[in-house]
Each structure stands twice: as C-alpha cells, then as structure tokens.
Amino acid sequence: MDAPSSAHPLPAPIPPNIAAWFRAKGWAPHAHQVAMVEAAERGESALLIAPTGGGKTLAGFLPSLIELAERPREGLHTLYISPLKALAVDIQRNLDTPIAEMRLPIRAETRTGDTPEAKRRRQRAHPPHMLMTTPESLALLLSYADSDRLFRGLRCVIVDELHALAGTKRGDLLALGLARLSRLAPAARRVGLSATVAEPERLLAWLSRSGRWSADGGDGDVRLVLGRSGAQAEIGILDTKERLPWAGHMALHALAEVYDRIRRHRTTLIFVNTRAQAELVFQALWRVNDDNLPIALHHGSLAAEQRRKVEGAMARGELRAVVATSSLDLGIDWAAVDLVVQIGAPKGSSRLVQRIGRANHRLDEPSRALLVPANRFEVLECRAALDAVHDRRLDGEAPRPGGIDVLAQHLLGMACAAPFLPDALYEEVISAAPYATLLRDEFDDVLDFVSTGGYALGAYERFQRLRRREDGRLSVAGPAVARQYRMNVGTITQEALLRVRLNRGPVLGEVEEYFIQGLTPGDSFLFAGQLLKFLGVREMEAQVAKGGSGDPKVPAYAGGRLPLTTHLAERVRAMLADPRSWDRLPGDVKEWLTLQRLRSLLPSRDGLLVETFPKAGKRFLVAYAFEGRNAHQTLGMLLTRRMERFGLGPLGFVATDYVLAVWSLRSPSSTQGADMDALFDQDMLGDDLEAWMDESSMLRRTFRNVALIAGVIDRRHPGQEKTGRQVTFSSDLIYDVLRKHDPGHVLLRATRADAAGGLTDVRRLSDFLARVRGRITHKDLDRISPLAVPVILEIGRERVDGSATDELLAAAADALVAEAMPELRQTAAAPAEQGRLSL
Amino acid sequence: MTVQGTEAPGRIDDSRAPVALHGAALVADASGALLWPAEGVLAVADLHLEKGSAFAARGRMLPPYDTRATLERLAALVDREKPARVLCLGDSFHDRRAGARMESADAERLRALTADAADWVWITGNHDPDPPEGLGGRSVAEFRLGPLVFRHEAQPGAVGELSGHLHPAAALALGGRRVRDRCFVTDGAKLVLPAFGSFAGGLNVLNPAIAGLLAPRFDALLTVRGRIHRFPRDRLSPDRGG
C-alpha cells in the first residue's frame, strides 16, 4: 500500500489508535484520504480520482478499517473488487500489515478462480470481514441461493481500477452485480478508485445507485474526491541521431539511445504496445547491453511464475530496466522507477498519462518519461499526445450500452439464486449504468432468449430453462441449468492458447494456437526473451528447444493493438494542416511534410484528402482518414466491394492507424460515376455492410464471443475442455444458420452492436463518412506522394505480422523514397549491406 | 441424371470432381453429396437432423433451424440431380427422439422428399439404429450395389466401401492463410463422405481415426464455398500437430 507522505494535522474523523499508527510510521493522511473517511461517515458513496501512488488504495479501505476498529462485528463488511486476480492477492497482503500492526479485529481474504473449493465453501459459511475478489467471482457468489445471507450485512463495496472496468463487458457484469448487491444490502456504500480520466461524470454515473448522473450534479448520490495531482510530468520525445524510419513499429533504430538512458537512470520501465514488440525490443536491448545490466521482460503470455519473478526482482530494486506491455499497466506500483520509456506511439493520451504515472511515486517530484516514435507518422502522434498531456486533455470515449450477452448471462445467474419477478428484475437492471437506457421490450427479448433461446420459430417452448411459477416468478427448470451457468460464468473470451514447454522441462508461457499452427518443426521464434526452436505439438503443448536458427518468427499475438483515439487523430490532422507548427518537429519529418506540400496537398483538418497514382502497373488510391486501423479495415472492405461494382478491379488494400491504401487494375478517374463522392458515400454502410457481414471472419469471431458469453455454446463441458478450434467451428455453423433463418435474432443484434464499436468500428466509420461528406479533395498524381510512402511500405507485411524485420523494410523504403522524392536521393541511399526489395 | 455445368467434354466445373472407387466412376459434389451417375445414385452422410433441439432439450439453446437448413439443401440437390435412388449413410437423425421433436412443417417436407424418390434408403447409424417411423423411405443396415457397398461406419480392410460417421474435414495453409472445411477423403479403395448436416462438426482427416483406416497415400476433396479442390495427404495440415 502506498505511503502517504506530506504532513497534515490529524483531522477529527481518524480515531486515536489509527492516528497513532500513522504517527508511528511517520505519516499523515492525505487530504483525499480524510475526505473519503468523511464521505463514509455520512454514508455516502464516493469516487476517488487520483494519480497512481497517491495512497489511493488505503484511502478506499481506511473508512472500513476505522469502522471495524471502532465497532467490531462478524460477517462480511467490505467487498473489494479488482480486475486482476494478482492485484486482489497483492492488496490483501498489503492490508494484512496495517491490520496486524494496529491489532485490528479484522480478517481479510481473497476469493478468485484459484481459491480451493474447501476454502470457498468456508468463506460462504463463515465470511471474512473483508473479501478481495474479481467481477467473475462476485457473479458466482451472487448466483447462490445463500447470497442473501452472505451479503445482507455488507457495508462497503470498493471497485479498484474503475477506469479500466467501466465501458467493458467485465464492467457490465460488475455493474449488474452491484445492482443486485444494492438490493441485498441497501446500506452498502460504493467506492470507486480510478486513475485520471477525461470525463469523471461517466464514472460517477457508473457508480451511482440510480445508474445516472445529472449534469447539474444536484441529485447525485456519489461524492467526487480528487487526489492531489502530482507535479507536471517531464515528457520528452527522443531526438534521435539516426534517420527516422518510414514504417515499422519496433523503433530498433533508437534502441542504442534508449540503452544509454537506461544506463543513466536507476530503474527504467519500457512500455511497448504489443507482446511481439516486447520480445523484439528486449532482444535488441540485450544486443547492445555491453555492461550486462539486469534488463527483464514482462508480458501477459509469460508463465505467471516468470512474471512474479520479474515483479519480485523489480520490487527489490534489482533490475535496471523492464520491457513490458500493458500487463504492467494496472496495479502494482513501482516506487523505484525514475524513467518511463514509451516505444512506439501511445495511441491515446489517457493511456500515456497512466503509463507515465508508473514512474516516481513521490508526488512532489515530476515523473520523467521519454517517447520513442518508431516511424514518421508516430512522430506526429507522439507530438500530439505530448501536447494533449500538457493541456491536461484526455481522450473521452463515447459510452457504449451494456452488452446483451452479458445481460443474458446475468439473468440466468439471478434465476439460479432465487425465483424472480421480471418487473422487479427489470427495475434492478436499469439501475446499473450500462443498462440505464435499456427498453423493457429489449429486456423481455433477452429474458425470452434465456428461457427458450428466443427463436422466431418458437420451437423450444417445451425446453424452457426458466419456468413461470404460480406466483408469477421465474425459476430455473432444474439443477442442471445452474450447473451449466456456473461453468460458463464470465465475459473473458480469448483465442485458444497452447503452453510453450522447454524440452519437457519448464513451461515458459502461452501463445495463441494459430501462431503455432503457422510453424513447422525446426522453425525458430522469439519467446520469453530467447530464441527457441519449435519441435512439435504434444498433448496440447508446444514443445520447444533452446537455440534454433534462421529468421525467427516473432509470436504475432492477437489484440494488444489499440486504435488511435479520435482525440489524438484530431490533433494529428490539425498539426498536418498547420505548417507553422512544424518547427517543433524533427528535421526529417519537417522536410517530409514540406515535400508533400510541394508534390501534392496536405490533408485538411476536417475534410478528406484522397490521392491516386500509378505504381508498378497498378492504380493506387490512398485516403488520409486518420480514424484508426479498425475503422480503416472496415472502410477497406466496403470500399473494395464498391470498386468491384464500378468495374475498377480492386486487388487489395492495407490499413494503418492513419491511412487506407487500395490498389486496383483501373483508376477511379477512368470510370464514369466512380468519383470520390460516390466511392465514399455513406450508403456503403447499408447493403455493402450487410453483405460483408455474411463472410467477414471478424463478425464470426465477434459472434463466437457473444455466443460464449450468452451461454449458447459452452466454455467447457464437465470433464472435457473444449478446444478453441472446435468452438470456432460450431459457432460458425450457428452463425450461418441464424443469419439465414432468423436474421433479427437477439444474438445477431448483439453481434452487430459489438462489432460497431469494436473490431469493425462501424460507429467511428459512420461519423467519419458524415463528417467528410462534400469535403473530399481528390488529387490525381503521376507518382507516389511523400505522405503515401509509409502505407505503401506496409503492403505485404500485414499477413506476416512482425516477421518482416525493420531492416528489410528500410531497404524497401529507400527505393520508394527515391521515387517519391528524388531530391532526397542523396540521404536516402541504401546502406551497402542491405539488399533492395521491390514491391 | 446428368453431370451439369460442363463447358467442354471431359472437363468438369469446379463445383464437382470425378472420383474413381473400386472401378466405379463417381462424382464428389461441393455440397457434400456423392453422385454415381451410372446408377442414378445420390448419397449423403450424417444429416444429424434435430441436433439443435437435442441440445435444447438438455438446456443448451442452439438455434432450431438446422433441420430446415439441412432439408432445404438436400431438396435443392434432389431437385437438381433427380436421382433414382437416395442413400442416407446413417446418423440421419441425431437421436432416437428426433422424429418426435421435429417441427411438423419440417416433417412434412421430409415426407414429400422421400415420397418423390423412387427409392429412399435410410442406412442405420449409431445415432439412429431405428430411424423414426412415418417419414417414408426404407431402412437397412448396409446397401450393396455393383462393386460398391454403402454403410455408416467404415470397416478396416473393406474395399469399394463408402461410409460416413467420421465427419472428415481437412485443413491446409494457403499463402499464409489457413483454410479448413469439410471434405471427402479417399485412397481409391475406400471413400468417406463429409457430414451433410448443418450442425455437424468436422474431424481432421490426419487424425488416426480417419488416416488409420486408409492407405498411407490418400486424397482429400475439400469443399469450400461451393467449390471442390483435391489435395494429396502431404499438402494437408493437422489441427494441432496430431
């Protein structure tokens, strides 16, 4: 737990024995910790927004410690919910110290998926005073018939890392759980702990017992407590001596300079965006690690044991640097870190702020951070993120309605707990913020789905899972239904994973099955920081040996790539459109933009620039949309369909966070009616989108997750873990049949809603098409423009994600640069040892 | 019955592929059906009718449309091929109570189908040792015609044998992408048909349960989006190294 540092006079609400403990530690409570105690005394719920290291967790627990110290009692008093199992365990351990030192009559325990069955049973019979758990474990507890007895005396629910839960499906599940808790324990206060966010109102609404927050704040039932914000962070962008790469995401060019910074700091935390990046950057740092500095690796695929080892060494101050992904974004604090390095663009300003917050937890000293852009567009993005942090502007996210699949799971869970009246449960559900606007019709549809599958055919009336009793309540049809529910609870769905085992020895971690399927025995790949040789798959495990040769394939993990936020995209567009702001950019980048202005046009702030040019016998179309890779992917799918209809013969496309490039046999200019306004017309979101949904693998994946969460397909059967491959196959069959025979089914509606905000980002695309309507500028060029070079370099490396090395790309870049900007030929000449790669 | 869609003599369009089995000239159709033009035979395997409702009866609410979807595809095939004889190679019904659960409209459609065929044969399978009464057709344990025998489960060593039961599927890597779908599999002596039912899953042909039945060299005829592609065993990939 974080130590409060500054000296305040001890205020009244802190009782003497606790005050004595603070004094003995040489601490004094922070103002926000006192405010949290005051809120508790008035019985108010509270949202504490404070940067990491502000004694946030203690502030959350302090009122409960006081209450239990003054009025000892039995039974569950405080429930603590964290998004990470490890964090729950960590917090419990950290609480044990003050509880022991103050000799408080308090028992604190954790309950997660890892808790042994005997202990779980005991916890339900004799609950501890404080229980640390996860959203999934809470959902399970609430599905038992004795949940009423367990939670009746509850006084406080603490939700940690609320910013990371709200707006996700896990957050939806938790919000529904809290709504139920409020019914079981009306006296329980809610406490939210959050990192700094753009719109606290959304979190206040989330925490509110009504699920709503009025703008005037008049009838809000949650008190907002703001922690002292720390000193303004010192953030810089690495001013590299090397030439800035045109494309790629690894920033290998700059790692010698990063290493130099590591040498000059006590402990450096190096954040990357993907696990594949983590492996490569870690390897590259060790290649230049002439001093043998202890540099470690931490990402979500490594075995838990390995991760704990790194975290332990970090806590003991034995490491000089850790290369990490967002696996270190949450939770555990590292006071000793005095520099945070972000490799690659941060993709959003909130994320950058949270990452910088990992450094230097003494609030009086500024955090120090260094951004290392991996390519030229990322220079613009880093600059935009840095400006946003200085302006204290964070990314606002459009709120998304709660998942229908999650609601279905919850309704079944509630039926398992006790028979319910639909009217009463509806009222309870809409008191949860994600479902505040849920219509009764929709609720009834979901209820119907839970009961009989909700199919138009009405064939399953006789197989009801919920039975209506004479008193109008619905109850589960039998114990088998409850068993099924408990086996499938939760909203975390992921690709099938295979363990990676070294020579029948230790497990190094897990990788996605599809990656392993792409390997043949003898192939080498980077994992857990070492070069491994793939031997084969045995009993659900990938067997590997050390060593290996040839070009390593880096594990190309799913996910981990967040799209550029709307807010940062706006800033990047503004910067491009305003040449006066270029003085703050590195020379390479300024020169690049200047040449773009000479050869073509600059993308405008609000419109859309589309360039077309011939290259290698094909016609290229590049749209500078800046809407993030997911929206661009979808745009690419829809645009190529439309081009097909116009007879342009589209051949392929590639999407980056910034632009979309499509290549075709014929130029749009050559075809009557195929002008840009027609190509980018909003009506592509109608039939084209529908048609695409038929075949899109993204929609199928989304459907699979929805079907899993909604309980149509099993997460696992008793005694038999279904493999990911089998699940994928059968959910595809269901998707096809459902689309054809019941296109309005609630699961398909849920799939579309998910896709609109997630992988396909249709919502963002739709806003974009509306925004640029009538503002599209088409520039027909006779050759590639400077700004188009990065995206053209991405062509051909999408599929082999991560396997193309940046060196190879650099060679390809030189050829293109020479074509786009002959005046740069001098500086762009390829180093002698590099071959040329033609596209 | 004729083989349709041929553009030139000797060339079959890509929704069909010729297969020789123990001296008989057969045609594998991308729909998953096997045709024997000389005998006017159309064979399908593992319809698994009412699989959706079988799950629903156990509390897993899969969509109820699988019977309808399967029968629609089968009806379209029969309409196109006009076979003299339809052979269903077992596991046509997902379980013993499938007939009782079937929607009346679906049962009606199935009765019309069986009534139209000159000979409709239900070969029994492990899921349907006694096919439901009242839906038409006749029920046999296996069916012999000329050099061929049709049965549900392949028997080791049998030649000129067509069977179902195993739901073969094949996977392969194509230009960095992975394709996996249902397939026919044959070594020239035996042929295993893919499952025809809308909700029937697939088992990789490299799995010993299938590969072990066949000669060391065999081909998979992969059905993907209305097309059929023939690949030798060594081009195929396993699902997980097995």
Image (cartoon, coloured by chain):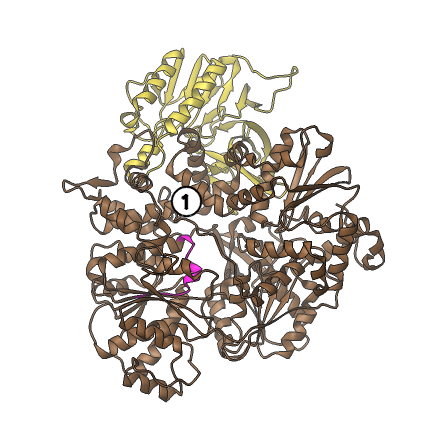
Q: How many marks?
A: 1
Residue A110 seen by the camera? yes
Which of these two is toward me, A595 or B64? A595
Q: Left or right: A303 with respect to A547?
A: left
- Percent of width and height locating residue A610: 68, 43
Chain B on-screen colour: yellow
Q: x, y (%) of residue A158?
A: 34, 66
Q: Which residue is mark 1?
A: A706
Q: SS at mark 1?
A: helix
State the image coordinates of residue B106 (x, y, percent, origin top left): 34, 22
Drawn side of residue A527 relative to residue B146, left or right: right
Q: In this view, which residue lies farthest toward the left?
A: A470
Range drawn in magenta: A157-169
Q: Color of chain A here?
A: brown
**Residue A93 visible in this rendered orientation of the protein:** no
A318 shown above or below A490: below
Q: Quadrant of residue A834?
A: bottom right
Q: Position of residue A752 (x, y in %)?
A: 45, 40
Image quadrant in which you'd find residue A262: bottom right
For the N terminus of chain A, the quadrant is bottom left
Residue A425 magenta: no
Q: Amino acid at mark 1?
A: Val
Residue A76: name its quadrant: bottom left
> Disc 1 sits on a residue from what chain?
A
In which quadrant will I find the C terminus of chain A?
A: top right
Q: Is residue B45 above or below residue A22?
A: above
Locate residue A60 relative to residue B239 in the image: left or right.
left
Residue located 84% across and 52% down the image: A822
